[in-house]
Image (cartoon, rainbow, N blue to C red):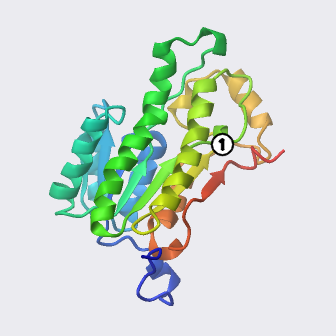
């Protein structure tokens, strides 16, 4: 079966961007980039399952976005690093929240730690990879099984500009390598799943999230100096890109990696 094509490719363009009636799930959706993804998908009309690990405000956050947008937004606690746990959550979302359907899954959960490469232990290496790489695979696998059964689905993976270069001056080999790995994983899945799903990636540059705001002003200044755009991005500036990939506006796009970094990876 060929890659999905909408019934009317000549539909007005803004209509193609609508997610009204779609069921979406976002891992790492309670804060940072994930929170803005949840908000963006909801603003575009989708009902969204916000998946979180430990954020105590997740349920309130979901309720607030639901009230703001007029669609259903519900928080689901899970752990992407555990294959059986995230699979159970994804299935629960499809069956209960989606009434038997799941259209869009965003594998967004991620962690980062600065560790000199000669000092990694099995534990510190796994702390990054179990979420950033394994967690993406287990989320994708659970979603893919549902998409195959449905005959249609859409997976979006959050990687990083760190997949394309080595950040300085911080030492984060595990993070960089895991982000590079998921870009290639997405390409593999895109080819393998063409009969029933699209798979694409967004690779953000430096974002004004807690991962950055906890850093020193000196380090922030060094990073800004390396960005041709001259500033660090607000995570809200990414939500429209996720809506684009989640929508029928780009049905022929699969296996792509959208780099949104203010030109950081260009020099």
Q: Secondary structure at mark 1?
A: helix
Crowdedness near tag 1: few (<14), some (14–19) or many (≥20) residues, C-alpha within 10 Å: many
| Closer-to-camera residue (182/50) | 182
Q: Is residue 40 above or below residue 140?
A: below
Residue 155, located in which quarter of the rendered image? bottom left
Percent across and percent down for residue 97 are: 19, 57
Q: Is residue 175 above or below residue 95?
A: above
Residue at 72% of width from left, 49% of height from top? 262
Is 12 displayed left or right of 152 in the figure?
right
> Which residue is label 1 attached to?
161
Residue at 71% of width from left, 43% of height from top? 231
Q: Quadrant of the N terminus?
A: bottom left
Percent across and percent down for residue 69 are: 32, 62
Is 68 displayed left or right of 13 in the figure?
left
Residue 98, located in which quarter of the rendered image? bottom left
Residue at 17% of width from left, 57% of height from top? 95
Residue at 44% of width from left, 89% of height from top? 8
Question: Taking the image as drawn, is residue 23 in sight?
Answer: no
Percent across and percent down for residue 154 are: 41, 62
Number of numbered markers: 1
Residue 196, located in which quarter of the rendered image? bottom left
Q: Quadrant of the C terminus?
A: top right
| Closer-to-camera residue (95/225) | 95
Q: Is residue 100 above or below residue 93?
A: below
Question: Taking the image as drawn, is residue 102 in sight?
Answer: yes
């Amino acid at each position: 079966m060929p890659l999905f094509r909408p019934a009317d490719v000549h539909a007005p363009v803004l209509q193609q961007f609508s997610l009204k009636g779609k069921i979406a799930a976002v891992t790492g959706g309670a804060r940072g980039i994930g929170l803005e993804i949840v908000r963006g998908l909801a603003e575009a009309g989708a009902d969204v399952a916000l998946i979180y690990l430990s954020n105590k405000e997740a349920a309130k956050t979901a309720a607030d976005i639901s009230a703001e947008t007029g669609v259903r937004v519900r928080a689901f606690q899970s752990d992407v690093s555990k294959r059986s746990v995230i699979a159970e959550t994804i299935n629960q979302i499809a069956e209960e929240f989606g009434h038997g359907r799941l259209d869009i899954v965003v594998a967004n959960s991620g962690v980062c730690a600065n560790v000199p490469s000669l000092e990694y232990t099995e534990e510190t290496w796994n702390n990054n990879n179990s979420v950033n790489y394994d967690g993406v695979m287990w989320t994708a696998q659970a979603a893919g099984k549902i998409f195959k059964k449905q005959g249609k689905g859409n997976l979006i993976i959050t990687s990083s500009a760190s997949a394309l270069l080595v950040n300085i001056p911080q030492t984060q080999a595990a993070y960089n390598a895991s982000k590079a790995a998921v870009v290639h994983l997405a390409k593999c899945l895109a080819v393998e799943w063409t009969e029933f799903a699209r798979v694409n990636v967004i690779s953000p540059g430096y974002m004004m999230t807690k991962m950055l705001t906890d850093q020193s002003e000196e380090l922030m200044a060094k990073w800004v100096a390396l960005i041709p755009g001259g500033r660090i991005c607000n995570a809200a500036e990414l939500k429209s890109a996720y809506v684009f990939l989640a929508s029928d506006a780009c049905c022929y796009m699969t296996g792509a990696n959208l780099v949104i970094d203010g030109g950081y990876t260009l020099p």
